Image: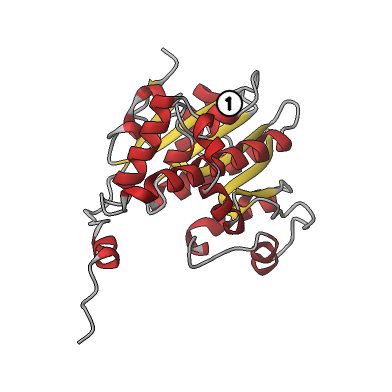
Amino acid sequence: MRCRIAAIALLFLASCAGPREHAGVQAPLAALLPAELLLVGEQHDAPHHQRLEHELIDTLAARGLLAAVALEMADAGASTAHLPRSADEAAVKAALRWNDAAWPWLAYGPVVMAAVRAGVPVLGANLPRTRMREAMADATLDARLPPAALAAQQQAIRDGHCGLLPETQITPMARIQIARDIRMAHALERARLPGKTVVLVAGSGHVLRDRGVPVHLATGITARVLLLQAGGASGAVGNPAQADLVLPTPALPPTDYCAGLRKQFAPRPSPQ
């Protein structure tokens, strides 16, 4: 079976880890490599996921296997490739045009800086916001997914907005998601180097095999999908067919993710 559901303790294989290698990522990497691309799907508010990504990047760099790190968290065209290893965080954030309000640097800075210190480029891979309106109106994007996958993508938009988004917005929002995945796929393809691995760090929905970045990669590219799943698997993200490896991580405190959206979509009182 292509996918292996992994319940791997963080200290597994600790005795085999080298001086700069991290026990938490040894078993996942052994199961996933070699690969031209390694797509890591995270839950953005799970600090453990960013720590594992940091360890993974450190380990690949120490082995001389890291070609580049591509990020959902920065727009395509942004890059640290021109910066020296010694660049400070301010220079790195400027090069990536980092939006700290959307993506807290406290969480992602260590991931980014691990690659910079290793002399490996960090690349923005996301669709720029200036292109989103164009994507919303582009009906050709609907055909980039098989009908069942398109329907699943649209349902994910409904679910992700807690059933509050007007139905007229579902198709345009799904098109943005598809356009983002296409842009990420192109960034990964351009960053490949022989014998090394490009790592993508993105939300779990972007790496799913049936509707995410893998759908848009050129035939013949060796890509592996690692899903980090806080508190165990659930829904489409927990479906073994969506990934090569699903790695459960500690559960997060219960959170009502819909509370803010309910306030946003609540009817405004009529002016008196």
Look at 33% across and 32% down and name the residue there. 236
Where residue 196 appears, x then y in whole percent? Answer: 70, 30
Q: Residue furthest bottom?
A: 272
Look at 39% across and 20% down and name the residue there. 4
Q: Nearer the viewer, residue 40 or 48?
A: 40
Where residue 229 appears, x then y in whole percent? Answer: 35, 38
Where residue 219 appears, x then y in whole percent? Answer: 64, 20
Q: Nearer the viewer, residue 187 or 85?
A: 187
Look at 51% across and 49% down and name the residue there. 136
Q: How many marks can you see?
A: 1
Quadrant of the frame with the N terminus: top left
Q: Is residue 57 above or below residue 210?
A: below
Q: Nearer the viewer, residue 35 or 52?
A: 35
Residue 62 in view (yes/no): no
User: What is the three-letter code of the residue carrying label 1?
Assistant: Ala
Q: Is residue 20 left or right of residue 240?
A: right
Where residue 139 appears, x then y in whole percent? Answer: 52, 39
> What residue would you read off at disc 1?
223
Look at 46% across and 31% down and name the residue there. 211
Disc 1 is placed on an element classified as strand
Q: Nearer the viewer, residue 177 or 52?
A: 177
Q: Residue furthest top?
A: 1
Q: Is residue 147 above or below residue 115?
A: above
Mark 1 burial class by Cα count in 10 Å: few <14, some 14-19, many 20+:
many
Quadrant of the frame with the C terminus: bottom left
- Colour approach in the figure: secondary structure
Residue 226 in view (yes/no): yes
